[in-house]
Image: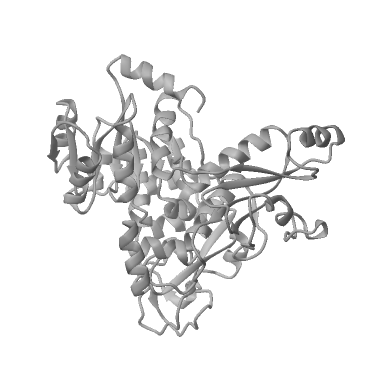
Amino acid sequence: MIGLYKDLEDLAAKGKKVRIGLIGAGQMGTDVVAQTTMMKGVDVVIAADIDLQRAREAYRIGRVPGEVVDVRTPAEADAAVRAGKHAVTRDYRVVTDMEQIDVVLEATGVPEVGAGAALRAARRGHDIAMMNVETDITVGPILNWYARQKGVLYALAAGDEPAACKEIYDFARALGFTIVAAGKGKNNPLDRHATPTDPAIVQEAARRGLNPHMLVEFIDGSKTMIEMAAVSNATGLLPDVRGMHGPHATRDTLNRVFALKEDGGVLEKIGVVDYGVGPIAPGVFVIVRTDHPRLREALVLRDMGDGPYYTLFRPYHLCSIEVPLTCALLTLRRQSNMTPMDQLVSEVFAVAKRDLSPGDVLDGIGGTTFYSLIDTYERAKSECLLPIGLAKGARVLRPIPKDQPITCQDVDIKPTMIYRLRQLQDMWFEKRISENELMQTIDQLANEPIE
C-alpha cells in the first residue's frame, strides 16, 4: 500500500471519494465509519444493519457531519448519496443493488449474510471487501471465482490478523525465504467450553463493549481457528496437527518454538499455520529459514540471530481501523491485498461443547453448543466433518458426546443459501459441474428480489 495516501489525496483534490457501502454496523463497522472521517478521499455513504438505530448510531458515534436519512430501496439510497447525504437501511440488498457506491464492505460476521451480500454485490458490479472471515473460510474460493467472472474484485480486508499475516508472508516469499510457519498471538485464555451465558463473560463483554458471543468466539479458540484457516486458504500453508499446536511463546522465543522437532521446536513439518499463547498478541509473525551462509552472516549483523530460523514480526494489527485501506486499494489500484485460492486448504469444523441430544439445534459461532477446530480440508472431508459456516440452525439427529467432532451425518443441516453455495463449491472442486452451469446457478442465488 505504498503511496496510497497520495492516491487518496489526489482523489479528494478532484472532489471525489471512494464510496463504501457498509453492511453490519456493529463495533467493527462503527470503527470503520469513524476512521473514514480522519481520511481523505474515502467515505461510508450508506450503512445497513437489521437494527436501524444501530446504523444511525454508527454515524453519530463516528461524528460524521451532515444529514443521515432512512432509505428502503436502492433508488432512494442513490438519490440520498447524489444529494450529499448519508443513508441507513435495514436491508443489505439495498446496499448491494444501488449504483452510487464503489465497494461493498461486509462486516456482519454472519456466514449466510456474508455469502449473500458478496454474491449480490458481484452480480451488480461492485468490488467486495470482506471482514466476514467466517464466510470466507466456508465459501471464499467460489465467491472469489464468481467475482472474477463478473469483472470485479474480492478481498479479505486489511487490519485483522489474516491480512496482517499475509502481508509478512508476501514479503518473505518475495525474498525467497523458506516459510516455516505463519501465525498470531492468542489474546485470551483458552477455554473450549466457554459460553455467552457465563456471568463472568457477560460482565467482561459489557466492560469491553462486545457482544458476549463475540467474546466467546475468541475465548473458546474458534476465532483463532477461523483466522488461521483464512491464512491457510490464501497461502497453501497447512495446520501441522488438528487444532494447531498453540504453544506458549514470547516474541524472543518464537523462532525456537516454531522450528522442526529435530531442531528443538514443536513442528513435524515446515509450511504451517499456527498460533502462540503468551505475550505475542496483538502481533502476528512469520518464521522463515535460510541455510545460505552469506545471508546467515548478514542476518547476524542485522540482529536477527544465528539462525537458521528467523522471526518476522508485526507487533500490531489495527482491525477495523485499517479496513478503509483495502477499499481504497480495490477502487484506485484494482488490487486485492488477500484472496483465497481456488481450492480450500483448511477446514474449520464444529466440535460438541457439551453433550448434545437428538432435537438440539446448533447455535452460532461463539455460542453454547459447539466450538471450532482446524484441520486440513482433505482430512475433514474424508471424515465428513461439519463446517462451522453451515452449523447454525442444524438439528442434532443422534447423541453427540462432549468434545466429539460433529459430522454431517450427525445433524440435519438447515437448507440455507450458503449451504447451497457450499454444495456448488464442492461440485466445482471435483469438476462435477461446468462453469456455465455454475455461473447460471449462482446468478439465480444472487438475484433474490427485494420485496
Residue 160 pos. (x, y %) = 47, 46
Residue 311 pos. (x, y %) = 68, 44
Which residue is pictured at 41% across the width and 67% down the height?
A: 391
**In this rendering, would 377 be left or right of 179?**
left
- Figure coloring: one colour
Snapshot quadrant of residue 250:
bottom right
Viewer-proximal residue among 65 and 274: 65
Residue 337 lies, with reference to residue 227, above or below; the image says above
**In this rendering, would 212 be left or right of 50?**
right
Which residue is pictured at 47% across the width and 69% down the height?
A: 371
Whether residue 77 is visible to the viewer of this picture, yes or no, is yes
Residue 395 pos. (x, y %) = 37, 76
Residue 254 lies, with reference to residue 164, above or below; the image says below
Snapshot quadrant of residue 96:
top left
Residue 38 pos. (x, y %) = 32, 30
The number of numbered discs placed on residues in the rendered structure image is 0
Whether residue 432 is visible to the viewer of this picture, yes or no, is no
Snapshot quadrant of residue 44:
top left
Looking at the image, the residue that sits furthest to the right is 293
**In this rendering, would 63 be left or right of 120?**
left
